[in-house]
Amino acid sequence: MTGLRQAGLSGIAAPISFDQAIAAAVDADRFPGATPSPTATETPADPATDPAQDPADQGSGSGSGSGSDTTQTPDDTATGPTDTASADAADGNGNGADETDPATIPTSASLVSFPWTVDTVAWPVEGTVAADDLPALRTAGSTSTILSSGNTSAGRDTTVAAAEQVGSTKALVSDQGMSDLLRQAADARSARATDRAVATLRATLATVAVQGSATGPVLLTLGRSWPTDSARLEQALDALEDTAWISPTDFSTVVDAKPGSLTLQSSDDGADRLTVLRRLVRSEQALVDFASAVTDPVQVTAPARLRTLAAASNAWRADTDGLTTVVDGIAADHRETIGSVGIVNSSDITLLGDRSSLPISVRNRSDWPVTVFLTVTPSNSFLRIERNAVEVTIQPRSSTRTTFPVQSVANGKVALSMALTSASGARIATPRHGRDQRAGAVGDRDHGPRRDRRRGGLRPRDPPQRPPPPPSPQRRAGTRGRRPQPSPRDPAPRAGRASAGRRRVPVCRRGPTC
């Protein structure tokens, strides 16, 4: 009850809806021949027929039942749910339905509608309540919280009256030591072990009665698991009731008793368990952000909350490895759902002209229609986004292409960062970076024409100019070597004549014998 809040969830977690689970059960034909339940919320609010009124109040005819009526509640509770279900399917005269009538399909309201005797008391696991849990439980609607004595300033081995005040919260403190003895008697595998545990419990209660350490009723609690043999619990309770110095009393008298004063010894759900539950809470919160883009967010959040509550239940308290495996599976499913909506990859493009439209595709692989807002942010001022945060609605299992009006301010490369958000501002898809746009038709050889800034238009590229070759070295007189060749740009000399401005002078180094 308090573990998820300690792991980061705001408040005390509760089911959102069972409609999806009920619909899945109906589709799987788990209610053969069943008819839909009548909708009680459509009936006008009438004190005589209002389903929100406490069944015990309706039976007594007054605002609060008497002590004798309350003590009979446990006997009535065994058949109460059956009678209530029959009354729902009755013919309207209060005579009940025939046993051969088909069952009715439950609703979210009927699944959590129990004939509680006291429905405003919270009972967290002993030794797991932190200081911030009490205000959260009070906000959730609990007027009293059952705490073990070891979770208070009284201590585990100190017996105090059940009704106490812890800060601004009314608490019902159970005696942790004697509660352990009662659980040993209920879970014993033999009658002898039950008798031994009951004898120790009797002696402890006799000591408390003689010392007078408790000025009011003492509260004992059972464990969360089902007893191995229910007859052992009945045997233990009968033995306590037959003891002269023990007088069982109704739980409602304990709730209404004048409280004393204690302080809370803050505790938690355990470091290992909280580490796993924090991952579970973060995963659910990420899914809730994604669901804000879905047309009906409950279709996403309600089944996820049921899985979260099941994973955080006390059934996994003694199996941290099993809890880790379950949370890993839930987190993987949530990541797959969140990743079902995103921006489709595309290649680099070249934008021509001063104004153009940037095409972007958004996909939706989920089973629900989503509405997102697409935002594009350029990496520099070469490109200006004229209209941002464009609303895009994508149907299930499809993709939609939208365009962004943009204006080219200067030539150059622009990297765009694109993000998807919901109407509430929650980020749906991780921003995508690195899509280079050629703003204004960048003047590279491989990316089309370049912009003429003087005319504001486009002109063809100039043909590539080959760099001129280096000038040929001139042959110096009196040196060996070949005759210098004319440059490719110079016109070739005619045969038998020297080039203009040049003379051909023979040179011989052997003297007058040449």
Image (cartoon, grey):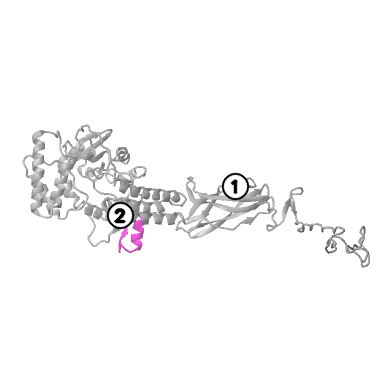
Disc 2 versus disc 1: distance between alpha carbons? 46 Å
For the residue pair 471 and 37, the one nearer the viewer reads as 471
Decide if residue 83 is on the left or right side of residue 232. Answer: right
Decide if residue 502 is on the left or right side of residue 455. Answer: right
Q: Secondary structure at mark 1?
A: loop
Give the image location of residue 157, x and y in percent: 16, 39
Residue name at image x 25 percent, y 37 percent:
265
Residue projecting furthest to the bottom: 495
Depicted 106 relative to depicted 270: above or below: below
Give the image location of residue 79, x and y in percent: 19, 53
Q: Upstream in the sequence, badge 2 or badge 1?
A: 2
Quadrant housing the C terminus: bottom right
Does residue 38 show up? no
Q: Amino acid at mark 1?
A: Ser
Residue 18 is inside the magenta segment: yes
Q: Which residue is mark 1?
A: 379
For the residue pair 278 and 103, the one nearer the viewer reads as 278
Look at the numbered discs 2 and 1 and tell me whether their residues touch, using CB distance below 8 Å: no
In the rendering, which numbered label is found on residue 321? 2
Residue 27 is inside the magenta segment: yes
Depicted 34 relative to depicted 354: above or below: below
Q: Amino acid at mark 2?
A: Asp
The quarter holding residue 477 reads bottom right
Q: Residues within 10 Å of mark 2 (few under 14, many from 20)?
A: few
Decide if residue 487 is on the left or right side of residue 276. Answer: right
Give the magenta-colored segment's residue range: 17-38
